[in-house]
Amino acid sequence: MVDRLRVTELDFDTIKANLKAFLKQQAEFQDYDFDGAGLSILLDILAYNTHYNAYYLNMVANESFLDTALLRDSVVSHAKSLGYIPYSSKAPVAIIDFTVESNNTTSGTCTLPQGFSFLSSQIDSKAYNFVVVQDTTVTKSNTKYIFEDLQIYEGQFISYSFSFEKSSNPKSIFQLPDPNIDTTTLRVSVTPNSANSAAKIYQKVTDVLDITSDSEVFFLQEGRGGLYQIYFGNDVIGKSLPDGSIVTATYLVTSATEANKANTFIATSTVVDSTGAALTNFLINPKSSASGGSLRESVDSIKFSASARFSTQNRLVTNKDYATYILNSYPNIESISVWGGEDNDPPVYGKIFVSLKPKENYYISEAEKQRIVSEIIDPKSVISVSTEIIDPTYLYILIDVDARYDPKKTTVTEQRLKDNIKNAILEYRNTYLNKFNSRLVDSKLEASIDAVDLNAIIGNQLVIKAQKRFTPRLNQNFSYEINFNIPLKRGTTTNRLSSTEFQTRDSSSVLRTVVIEEVPSSFTGISSILITNPGLNYITAPTVVITGDGTGASAEAKLVNGTVKEIVITNRGIDYTRAIITLSGGGGISATATAQIDAKIGTLRTIYYDSTAQRQVVDENVGEINYETGKITLNDINIVTVSSTDGQMRLTVESEKGIIEPVRNTILTIDSTDPSSVVTTLTALTN
């Protein structure tokens, strides 16, 4: 028996059924046929109306909170309450050296005015306009005006003027009609009235703590419909506009990402120097192709960034502050890593390190790095802390898959199954790798491979190798330090470090084509002795006593000002797996040291194979490999040529662990263009 309406059931059919049940229990409608009468239409209308209202109120409730809001206007409004302004489209910026030839040596100056334009070469059959965003003046050098490192922005300058009448616009809000504004180029000036041409430049507010009632500033916000608005102070926070004043807004309307990578330009305007000469003889040398162009911030990004930006309180103190603020101010970043100097290798105190992976390229140009530091980071960072942007380093992962499968349980060919396995590995890369702080987990990768065909694939095993690439300096002796930054597996006679073939000269100056390999070790010796306490008051060098399970190791201590400065190994010894260092005598106290065993350090050599396929050693010791830290050093090696199409040396070695977690500025990736990056061996079940 239903004695009341069920207000918690809000879909149309249930609402109508509840209304029927409620009416049927009334005496007036006990024998009424609701389905066959006209009253059914009225119930439909009532149910529809109730359903609409329920849906509307539910959506209103959703839009009331930042986490659940779907409409951009709602999300922007919530972000505004947190002091967050969504970033606009960003214009690509190119850097050029622009030389103007005057054909005389008369001294003078030349100014490129704001809006001086260049036309780029075509990208996808379209050329783009680039402009100078502020007046730039140089002095003549001989017969030339040279504008070095000139920044040019893609887009068209637009200017709008608004008349302010306090009676009709009491909040002094003005809407900019173009949706593709780059707000970083926005310039606002105010003229007191139409009869007064003395315009004053107003600055955009970045921190309300810096402004007073007399500050000539404007505020920026995103209004309804995705259009940006500017508004002014109230004589408490910022100076208010005088009634009848004229507000002029000038800004760049950009194509955003479409013009990224433009790198060839021609000037489309004439230059006039201080002598009044019109100059058209130009030389343009591109130094950095256009980059940094990005679309306006998405709704999902606003939700994430607003709360994160609020936690930074518009200052850069913690690593998270830097990451959030840079991503907001320079949205052309796909991934960012920030670490303090105390976590660097080696430590550099008083400095913040930032590494950025752009969305479209591998690296950011040096000019862009300087611009990010000077325009974005420095104004908000702690004065005593400097910032350095360094390039990401890429650690390439090579996967050898050994899988067993039952051919009776699949209809695909063996080659198709291999292709599907490779695609699954590349999908894993796209999901979990290719960014900072990524992690490769062999068990998850194995599960992804099994999931390619759960019926046919019985199981798989992986051998995971890591590869570093670098461009050597040819025809000169040079030392290299290559950091894998992960533990590496000590090689065996069948599985050890490998390298790209390259040419070098042997001791007789004969050119040899060689590779680098680990020296197979049948013994372990003492590789180094580290001083843990230098002690004090030593008159003579203490005696170094090495005890352990090996034999033959010896060393000598060196003193500086009564302390042990260095311990030099005179004999590495053999067959050590552990060793204890004792310092005795010398008249001092407290000096201690520890031994590093060869098990942590491996020796590298260069070899080639002669005409009888016998291994010949060219250099018995070209460097070493630290298996614990993943650091490889090549000492004073002369590489003449490299046998690779891209001119890069590749060092490949198996990872010690199945979970690879790189540090700082290292990005894990799998090179899909390299056929050796994924090698699959399929073994068919025979019974």
Image (cartoon, rainbow, N blue to C red):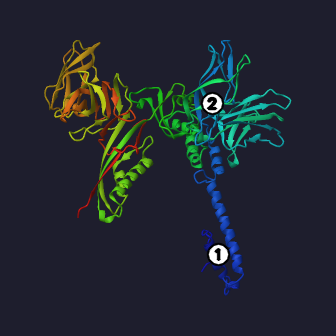
On screen, 648 above or below 8? above
Q: N-terminal of the two: label 1 or label 2? A: 1
Q: Relative to 531, is 645 on the left or the right?
A: right
Q: Position of residue 388 (x, y in %)?
A: 49, 28
For the residue marked with disc 1, what is the amino acid? Lys
Category of crowding for the residue at label 1, using alpha-carbon neighbours closer than 10 angstroms: few (below 14), some (14–19), many (at least 20) = many
Q: Position of residue 66 (x, y in %)?
A: 60, 50
Category of crowding for the residue at label 2, using alpha-carbon neighbours closer than 10 angstroms: few (below 14), some (14–19), many (at least 20) = some
Q: Residue at x 44, y 29 (%)?
A: 341
Secondary element under disc 1, as helix, strand or loop, is: helix
Specify the farthest residue to the right.
195
For the residue marked with disc 2, what is the amino acid? Ile
Q: Residue at x 59, y 38 (%)?
A: 122
Q: Position of residue 107 (x, y in %)?
A: 67, 12
Please give the label number shown on residue 16: 1
Q: Residue at x 29, y 12 (%)?
A: 561
Q: Is residue 649 visible?
A: yes
Specify the farthest residue to the bottom.
31
Q: Relative to 55, is 403 on the left or the right?
A: left
Please give the label number shown on residue 266: 2
Gap between marks 1 and 2 measured at Cα? 71 Å
Q: Quadrant of the N terminus?
A: bottom right
